[in-house]
Amino acid sequence: VRWIRVLYSDFSAFTKDQEYLISLHGEAMKFDYVEGFVIVDEGLINNWRSSFFSPRNPVKVSSLGNKGGVLYCLEMTKNYDESSADTIDQ
């Protein structure tokens, strides 16, 4: 499996790309898995598996409204086998 993660700071670009990738369903050049999610700024880069604030910190969650601190992430996978291994990166 080739796993790709792309980070966005612009919500419009994120949703445009996500909708495009989902629209490829049934096409030959599609990803096998596409997921989009929001990452809030609480040390995510060092702890990428957690995209949610701690429930112990509701004040910080509400403070993000106008200050940024949010990234958007698209995560995709492409499955391959020996017959397609040479072209998976195309």
Image (cartoon, grey):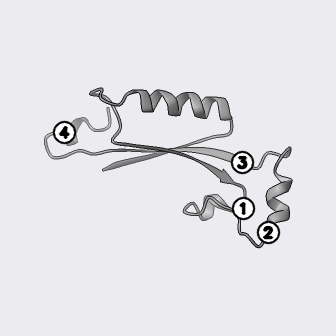
Q: Where is residue 35 in the image (x, y as percent from the top left)?
A: 48, 45
Q: Tell me what residue is drawn at x 30 percent, y 29 percent.
A: 26
Give, as a three-letter code, the residue at label 3.
Val
Residue 17 drawn at (x, y percent): 53, 30
Residue 66 falls in which quadrant of the image?
top right
Q: Which amino acid does label 2 sit on?
A: Asn
Q: What element carries label 2?
A: loop
Q: Does label 4 or label 2 sit earlier along the sequence?
A: 2
Q: What residue type is labelled 1?
A: Glu
Viewer-side label of 4, 3 = 3
Local crowd at mark 2 within 10 Å, few (<14), some, or many (≥20)? few
Residue named by callout 4: 84
Determine contact: label 3, label 1, CB under 8 Å: no
* For discs 4 and 1, the disc positioned in front in the rendered view: 1
Secondary structure state at the residue bearing disc 4: loop
Q: Quadrant of residue 45?
A: bottom right
Tell me the distance, in whole angstroms, between the alpha carbons under discs 4 and 1: 39 Å
The earlier-in-sequence mark between 4 and 3 is 3
Task: Work out how far the residue at label 3 is from the one at label 2, CA to CA, in angstroms.
Answer: 16 Å
Q: Position of residue 80 (x, y in %)?
A: 23, 44
3 or 2: mark nearer the eye? 2
Under tag 3, what secondary structure? strand
Q: Are marks 4 and 2 in contact (CB under 8 Å)?
A: no
Residue 42: mark in rendering: 1
User: In terms of sequence position, does the residue under pointer 1 or pointer 2 come before the other?
Assistant: 1
Q: Do the residues labelled 4 and 1 touch (CB within 8 Å)?
A: no
Q: Mark 2 points at which residue?
A: 57
Residue type of the residue flagged with mark 4: Ser
Query: Does label 3 or label 1 sit earlier along the sequence?
Result: 1
Q: How far apart are marks 4 and 2 (CA)?
A: 47 Å
Q: Would residue 61 be found to the left or right of residue 8 on screen?
A: right
Disc 3: which residue: 70
